[in-house]
Image (tube, coloured by chain):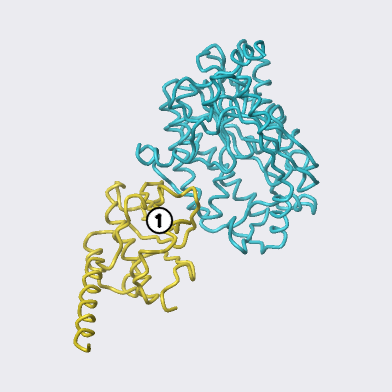
Chain colours: A yellow, B cyan
Amino acid sequence: MKRSLSRCLAVSALLFGAAALADDGFYRPSPGNLYVTTTERYLYIVWAVPQNLAPFTHIRQQADLEAYLTRTAIFLCTEHRSRVPDASRDCRVQLVQMNSNDEYTRSAAGGFRTIARMLLPLASATPEIHRRVQTQGIREVRPLFTQFDLRPGAIPLVGH
Amino acid sequence: MLVAEVHLRRSIHPPTSARFPFAQPGLLRSVVEVTRPVLGLEPRRVVVRTNALGLRGDDLDLADHQTLRVVTLGGSVTECLLLDDADTWPRRLQDVLGARAHRRVWVGNAARSGQLTLDYIAHARTLLPALEPDLVIVMSGGNDLQAAIEERLLPIDLSDPTTLARYASRLYGPGDLDGLHASYVTFWLERYVSGSSQDFAPLYARMAQRRRQARTLEEIPFLTDAIDVYRANLLQLIAALRQLPTHPRVLFVTHPALWKPDMSARELDALWAGYTCMQCEHPEYYSPRALAEALQAFNRELLAVCASTRVPCYDLATHVPRTLDTFYDDAHLREAGAQLVANTVGGFVNSHEMLNR
């Protein structure tokens, strides 16, 4: 009994570890949950998450959540920075929560609300910086952003 | 019966294309009521109809290319839901333009409550090619501002066909005209009898009360961002309108509203918009001063975009008095306001010879 329990725990730890590795410390939204375009001031990225906030359910600490969001924002800005010719613009990432668990492109008419707005100078959206911050916490990553506005309580964490 | 059938078949012309994008079902008839005084409105009962193209306006045969076609895009201020068909500003504009034209002028009102510039881009890419207008008039900005306040004003690239198809799927539906061909008279009678009726008084009373009880905010956050997004969407719209195969003339008009810094108690009682969220339990509301300044910023941006792209723009907002004689709430027009808008916009179109083709 004791042995099977410890085996079960070991398997769980392995699975959890595998999930964390696959996670890479940031999130890759599906194409249906992502709108990328340019405005006069910004590379503008709209990142939609379902009502159940599925991308964040594995996160337990507020600092981890904020680091996860900022690392994802850097990933998205880096991924799409070729859309703007120069690096003088900023990258605006607007995180919206849908009123359903469907993708943004299918259910935007059903309503959504903004839960975070982040602003990153494009100069900070490089593959090198993205690689560097993958293991860093919010204290290291936050200074890269000129704005990080996460609405209080917008993403309730399990255990809080 | 036979005479009626012949008459209806001569005047009603559903589109022949099975892929026609209906913004609303065709040949609808609904009754809109306000059963008690609310906002700046006296009790009323108005009839709202759509033609066989799913637009508010007279019937039009798409095969008739002798008629000068004007299409209006906008939100509820252009839709004029609480005005009778004959009293809407687009319908009255038809009379103003028709009085000066040598040919029949038709104005089709494609505006819908809540629609904003992104929706007009979709219309420019989907609906307008089917309507082949000679002139497109756009009243934008009002719902873009409300969306900005609710932080749901986004730039979306609708030049991408996949994105456009997904976006447009929520704007268009079937015309629901399947039963028409069997008998126009029966179909018309069925629609006449089964037409819906809705009383807006309870909704408006609730909304106005909610506004009076809520906390008032003075500064709209992220307004610079919102204007940036509005500019991007306007530029997209102009590009889409310029790609229309029939090369219609285009006129933008700035958005009028009742909002101003100093409002009387009666005027304040007429307000219900400017909320931070529609569905939440405790919405907050922006002050009339904040809303007036923000709408002015949106209107200024429209004028700037028009100037930089050389698209005709008429600063309508400066010609509409901010009084309850013109508006019955934040921005919706009474009959007198609708006539004023029709006269001034029509005067601009006529004086700039925008319908001479």
Type of amino acid under label 1 = Ala
The quadrant the N terminus of chain B occupies is: top right
Looking at the image, which residue is at 35% across and 66% down? Answer: A70
B50 or A24: nearer the eye?
B50
Residue B350 drawn above or below residue B265? above
**Spot occupied by residue A27 in the image (x, y as percentages of width and height):** 30, 62
Looking at the image, which residue is at 74% across and 47% down? Answer: B201
Asked if residue B76 lies left or right of residue B46, the reply is left
Residue B320 drawn above or below residue A50? above
Number of numbered tags placed on the structure image: 1
Residue B173 drawn above or below residue A91? above
**Spot occupied by residue A18 in the image (x, y as percentages of width and height):** 21, 70
**Residue at numbered disc 1:** A48
Asked if residue A82 lies left or right of residue B135, the reply is left
Q: Residues within 10 Å of mark 1 (few under 14, many from 20)?
A: many
**Spot occupied by residue A57 in the image (x, y as percentages of width and height):** 37, 69
